[in-house]
Amino acid sequence: MDPQRKSPEHTGTEHKFDIKIERPPSKPDVWEELLSILEKILDFCVCCITCGCYKRERNGIVTDEYGMILLDNEKQAVQNLLQYLEKDEKAEPVLSSEHIRALSILTYSDNAELQRSAALCMLEISERWRTDLTVALGRPLVELLRSDDTQVQKAATLATSNFCLSGGENNKEILMRLGVVDPLVDLLNSKNVDVQCNTCGCITALATTDANKHSIVSCNAVKPLLRLMRSMDLRVKRNATGAILNLTHIQSNRNELVNQGAIPILVELIHMSDYDIQYYSAAALSNLAVNPKHRAMMIAVGHSDVVRQLVKLLSSKKDRVKCQACFALRNLASDDENQLLAVETGALPPLHHILTSCRSETLAAAAACLRNLSIHKLNEAPFIHENLVPDLCHVVCDSSNPEAQKHIAGTLRNLAVSQYVRTLIENDCVEALTFVLLDLESRIPVLSEVTAALAVMADEDDVKYKLLHLQGGKAFSKLVTLASLSSHREIQYNSAGTLGQLALVSLPEDLKEANKKGIVLYIDKFLKSPDPSFVHVALWTLNMLLKDIFFLRAFTDHSIESVIEQVQTTHQLTKIQELSTSVIDKLHGVMASSSSSED
């Protein structure tokens, strides 16, 4: 078996992010606004009837201001919408075509007051609406987003956010089809913080599919979003950073974000004390760190300051912040120098604490981070001195968290290559791995890592003894079963590699008899594989097994020689040719011996 450490793992899209969209401290009062409009309509009508003799009085002051002149259809539109709004607030709204037409009339009116009332009414509808958005209703909403009036912008952006959050992907699809992104991007440049906050929230809510994320970036949303990430208003900063996080999920967007200057801003934001900002920015950095060039840029910003700050975040009071700090460090630790830097900066103690105190995703994230950090040879001693091994063994046995199991088994495999393999054995690491091997609930990715770790550790003589005798030889039998019957190539290969190590010692008679058919089967399958590495491990193991007369007879009875001859014809690698010749010589030796006995 190849004793080298496995390559580091990294990913940027392995789970759904918990993004909380910030809202304005209070929403506009729809009733107050519409009643104000009605008063003006009434005043105007009375004024017409009295030929101007009636003077409107407000707060004891008589005024002649009759600036609002409504068209007949606008009057009717207000009346229709008032009838709609007068229904029980808790009742599900039933919008008729007349109501939607009324909204459209007010939306396209030249009167700013009526546009405001349309936006406020749309906001009220969005908070009570429980069915999918329609094109007919979405069209005036998108038009309201194009208004120059700040009050209209506030209400329309908040209504858009509501529809995105409450109606699922259908509502977003309708809005995207109606061209909602362009006016939203324009509104990112608003000077009003409520509009900025709502608009960033809309973009965050819309950026949930790859197509939407690509469209948002294509409409030039990145630069204004990055600018708003430095807003003095915390709500705006949170929503803008959440939007950028959602946009980091696809590779083409990541390149554009980095080109527009996202990395220095994100590195700056992980230093903030706000937990939401820490979470969003660490998660975004984690996604960007999948790319080697992006990792180098992150390290260059502040001379590795990003690693030091992420290590600090491992001790956050919030699990979700710890989790994203683990993921970001894990991805940065895809590079050798960052593996060393993270450990030198003090990553192991907080990661160790997470292993013993956290559960679920945070634990799995810490395990993934430890796995990458364990790759560097200079990190071996710090891992051992931190006394991580007993807790690594505890976590690897916990089948309730298979993701953590997988990464911890990978970590143990990396450490098993080191000079400290004896420490692993003394801390019952073999027993822990064997427990997982025999656990019927163990998943394929976990078994892949466990068998890889055992294959490395089986180089030690006392490990060979344990694997042959633990639980009455069940571990040996399970390895034979996996090598012969598993549908997963890595598990097959790792199991065969471990069996090859065990073939170096004398196998108990009961195990040989019980597993004869399985051993012959997997050797035969491996020899017929087109993969030279499979053929090689089978030939090497077969050479060891044929020293035992029991297996000489078993493989002779199986007519293995014809299979070997086919290998010699198919595979021209020198090592395979040498091993094949050695096997045939051994087989011919037993045949000659049998002939002599008969004579």
Image: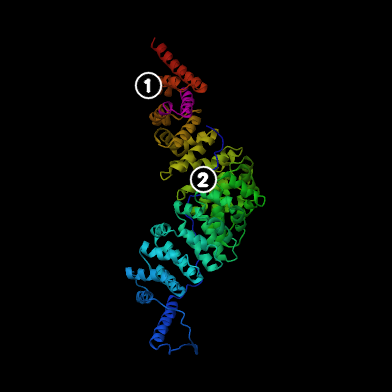
Residue located at (39% from left, 23% from top): 554
Residue located at (43% from left, 62% from top): 165
> Residue 577 at x, y = what percent?
49, 20
**Span colored in magenta:** 525-547
Q: Disc 2 marks which residue?
A: 407
Q: Which mark is residue 503?
A: none
State left or right for residue 408 relative to residue 115: right
Name the outermost residue toward the front: 51
- Tell whether position 112 is magenta: no
Q: Which type of secondary structure does the marked residue at label 2 adopt?
A: helix
Residue located at (39% from left, 62% from top): 167
Q: CA distance from mark 2 to mark 1?
A: 43 Å
Image color mode: rainbow
Name the outermost residue toward the top: 599
- The three-letter amino acid code for the residue at tag 2 is His
Q: Nearer the viewer, residue 328 or 376?
A: 328
Q: Disc 1 marks which residue?
A: 557
